[in-house]
């Protein structure tokens, strides 16, 4: 069975690999902590904006494509 990782799961995993708290990622990326929590919990009504994903990717030092849904 194929498992599909959501954007939220990918952000959380990348943040943990980078050994950052949600607060630290918020500071590094300029994305609000509330937004990061909602993204990681997949609590958004729509997909995160591309600009938000770019900021998160920069703060995590990863390619933005790594954060997209499978």
Image (spheres, rainbow, N blue to C red):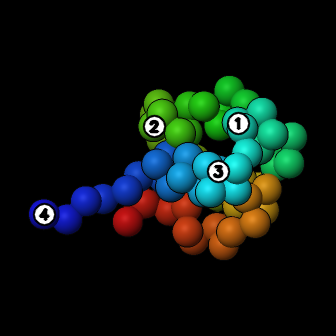
Q: Residues within 10 Å of mark 3 (few under 14, many from 20)?
A: many
Q: Residues within 10 Å of mark 4 (few under 14, many from 20)?
A: few
Residue ID for mark 1: 22
Left or right of 25 in this view: 1:
left
Residues at circles 2 and 4 in contact by the CB criterion of under 8 Å: no
Residue ID for mark 4: 1
Circle 3 — which element? helix
Name, please, the residue furthest toward the top. Answer: 34
Residues at circles 3 and 2 in contact by the CB criterion of under 8 Å: no
- The span from disc 2 to disc 1 (Cα, nearest Å) is 15 Å
Residues at circles 3 and 1 in contact by the CB criterion of under 8 Å: yes
Circle 1 — which element? helix
Left or right of 1 in this view: 25:
right
Figure quadrant of residue 36: top right
Between 25 and 44, which is closer to the camera in this rendering?
A: 25
Q: Who's the residue at 86% across and 40% down the image?
A: 27
- The span from disc 1 to disc 4 (Cα, nearest Å) is 31 Å
Q: Earlier in the sequence, mark 2 or mark 4?
A: 4
Q: Is residue 2 above or below residue 37?
A: below
Q: Position of residue 17 (x, y in %)?
A: 62, 57
| Res 3 seen here | yes
Circle on res. 42: 2
Q: Who's the residue at 64% across and 50% down the image?
A: 15
Q: Earlier in the sequence, mark 3 or mark 1?
A: 3
Q: Position of residue 38 (x, y in %)?
A: 56, 31
Figure quadrant of residue 42: top left
Q: Position of residue 39 (x, y in %)?
A: 55, 39
Q: Earlier in the sequence, mark 1 or mark 4?
A: 4
Residue ID for mark 3: 15
Q: Earlier in the sequence, mark 3 or mark 4?
A: 4
Between 11 and 13, which is closer to the camera in this rendering?
A: 13
Residues at circles 3 and 4 in contact by the CB criterion of under 8 Å: no
């Amino acid at each position: 069975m194929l498992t599909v990782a959501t954007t939220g799961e990918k952000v959380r995993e990348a943040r943990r690999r980078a050994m950052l708290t949600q607060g630290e990622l918020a500071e590094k990326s300029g994305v609000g902590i509330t937004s990061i929590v909602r993204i990681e919990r997949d609590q958004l009504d729509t997909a995160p904006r591309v600009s938000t994903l770019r900021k998160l990717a920069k703060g995590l030092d990863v390619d933005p494509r790594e954060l997209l849904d499978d």
